[in-house]
Image (cartoon, rainbow, N blue to C red):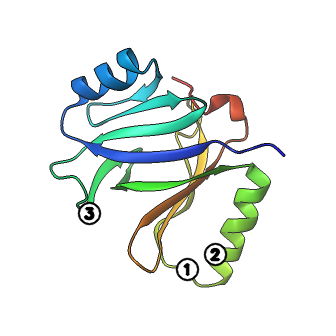
Amino acid sequence: MSLPPFHLAFPVHDLAAARSFYGELLGCAEGRSSDEWIDFDFHGHQIVAHMSGDAGDRSSNPVDGHDVPVPHFGLVLSMDDWQALADKLVAAGTEFVIEPTIRFKGKPGEQATMFLRDPSGNALEFKAFADMGQLFAT
């Protein structure tokens, strides 16, 4: 059985300190980034440090035209599994934070994504790549 990589976003107060700790100290390769967030390759899993004024708050950061909730966690699925889940959630009348969509269209890291909250309000992201080799594309 192959294990799909996980995706975890978390708040930080200082991107330079995050870059130093995750990139230099832990040896995580850096992927895409902006002035507000940094992707890291955490042993084949995608973790993302997002600037946030307060850990644990219900903040969001702009990513490719959407307000992405921070913190959030989720799974990277195959495209077929992602589409089946999206269809199931839509049919069930799920209220999405971000509707199923394609992010970074035509750019490195193009991905299908959707965000929703669990009954306790925790944000989850389910994403997929047509080419899994793009997971950490820069």
Against 30, is 105 above or below? below
Determine the CA span between mark 3 and mark 1.
Answer: 20 Å
> Which residue lies under the disc numbered 2?
89
Which residue occupies the extreme front position in the image?
25
Q: Dot 3 lies on which element? A: loop
Q: Please tell me which residue is depicted at 70% across the width and 75% down the height of the picture.
A: 88
> Which residue lies under the disc numbered 1?
94
- x and y, in percent, of residue 84 in the image: 76, 65
> Which residue lies under the disc numbered 3?
58
- Dot 2, how many residues are within 10 Å of its Cα: few (below 14), some (14-19), or many (20+)? some
Q: Dot 2 lies on which element? A: helix
Q: Amino acid at mark 3?
A: Arg
Q: Amino acid at mark 1?
A: Thr
- Dot 3, how many residues are within 10 Å of its Cα: few (below 14), some (14-19), or many (20+)? some
- x and y, in percent, of residue 4 in the image: 70, 45
Q: Please tell me which residue is depicted at 72% across the width and 61% down the height of the picture.
A: 83
Determine the CA span between mark 2 and mark 1.
Answer: 5 Å
Q: Is residue 107 left or right of residue 57?
A: right
- x and y, in percent, of residue 33 in the image: 38, 29
- x and y, in percent, of residue 51 in the image: 24, 41
Q: Say which mark, if any, is on residue 67.
A: none
Q: Is residue 83 left or right of residue 35?
A: right
> First in sequence: mark 2 or mark 1?
2
Against 55, is 120 above or below? below
Against 84, is 93 above or below? below
Determine contact: label 3, label 1, CB under 8 Å: no
